Amino acid sequence: MAIIIAVALLTFVVMLAFENGGSLFRGSAGTVVGSVNGQEIGLNDFGKKIDQQEEGLKQQGYTGTAARQQAIELAWRGEVNRLLMASEINELGMQIGKKELGDILYGPNPPQYLRQLFSDPKTGIYDARLAKSKIDETMRKAKPEQKAELNAYMNDLEFVRMNEKYNSLLSNSINYPKWYIQKQNDDNSQLSKISFVREVYTSIPDSTITISDKEVEDYVNEHKDQFKQDENRSIAYVAFSALPTAKDSAATLTDITKLKPEFDSTKEIENFLTRAGSTIKFRLTKNNSCGNQYYDFYFSPTYYSYSQYSLYTISPNPATSTLSVAVDEEKLSQDKIIKSNSQDIKEISILDKMGTLIRKQGFGNNIRKANLNISNLKTGVYILKIFNGKDFTSLKFIKE
């Protein structure tokens, strides 16, 4: 506010000085109107600037005392602005080079005054070459007063461009207070540099990690809150006894009795037992020309099926391409009935579920394990018939 008042007072003084031909300074030896930042404003130079402003106002139709006062005010403001800006520009080291001055005078946006003088009347296009030629000629051949006017004009253009640069610099800059810079420096001084190696857990194969049941149990006990679940359902049920009634037992006995004649007379025990089975297991022994056969027989009131007692294993089951048949050595060592019998694999037959022979393959002596290629079989259930030279064993497998 103090600066504004001081400038206003100084303007008032200058206006008084130049009213009525500058009578305020008449009869004195003073040649200085005022000073800005220690730089004096000379009376003669300031008077010329007033005349320039007044001439410009006359061209716009303004005359008289009011025009004179306005010219003084414009000239004074211009001088104060010029001196203040010159101080800032010099401190920043800003300059206008020859190339940039050429762009101001002859570039795509020339000053309005030059555009009016050197534009083609027909096309309105600015002739930069003609303008440069006339300005160069003036600087070489014109009178000193004309050269001085041209230099003053170009200085004004440079000053306008400097103002544009300065304003652009301010509008595109960011001001950080001193306390913020200090705080930022303090924060940066507390930062540390570290080096580390990052290993993604997915890069470690699961097969290389072994977790025991005890570790899982300990983890769950330590994080019980994470695994706690609220009750969200209820179950209603009805219990039925699975014990057979007298009627069920009588029906079962009748069904077994009906099966006995067929079982006694059949010559293909495997085909007969393929259609029978039970949830009650018991051992049957069948003597035939090939030796003894042992069967685990299953019977239920609604269906029959059987599984021959076997000292052989098949894997995998279900299978897709290869089926492996092997003697169950552990089971054989525990069996008191068949322990002395040879269980070498002599022959293997593959039958469909209706008992039709699909393939038969013989083997040599002392064969305890055999691999069968079943890739050409159709998908379904098959019977594997194993002959050890004395007894037959039938097992089911599934071809996928």
Image (cartoon, helix red, strand yellow):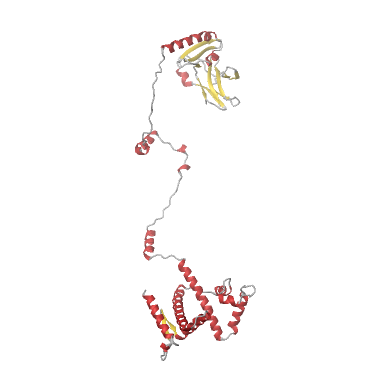
Q: Residue at x 46, y 67 (%)?
A: 171
Image location of residue 287, percent across then percent down:
52, 10
250 up-or-down from 231: above or below: above
Q: Is residue 226 left or right of residue 300?
A: left
Q: Residue at x 39, y 75 (%)?
A: 4
- Taking depth in this image into account, of 245 and 311 the one nearest to the observer is 245
318 up-or-down from 389: above or below: below
Q: Residue at x 46, y 11 (%)?
A: 251
State the residue lying farthest toward the right. Answer: 122
- Taking depth in this image into account, of 126 and 315 the one nearest to the observer is 126
The picture quadrant where one finds residue 36 is: bottom left
Location of the C terminus by quadrant is top right
Location of the N terminus by quadrant is bottom left
- Taking depth in this image into account, of 198 and 62 the one nearest to the observer is 62
Image location of residue 379, percent across then percent down:
57, 25
85 up-or-down from 400: above or below: below
Residue 368 seen from this side = no
Q: Is residue 46 left or right of residue 321?
A: left
The picture quadrant where one finds residue 2 is: bottom left
Image location of residue 154, percent across then percent down:
54, 78
Q: Is residue 120 left or right of residue 189?
A: right
Residue 181 seen from this side = yes
**Number of residue marks:** 0
The picture quadrant where one finds residue 27 is: bottom left
85 up-or-down from 299: above or below: below
Image location of residue 135, percent across then percent down:
59, 79
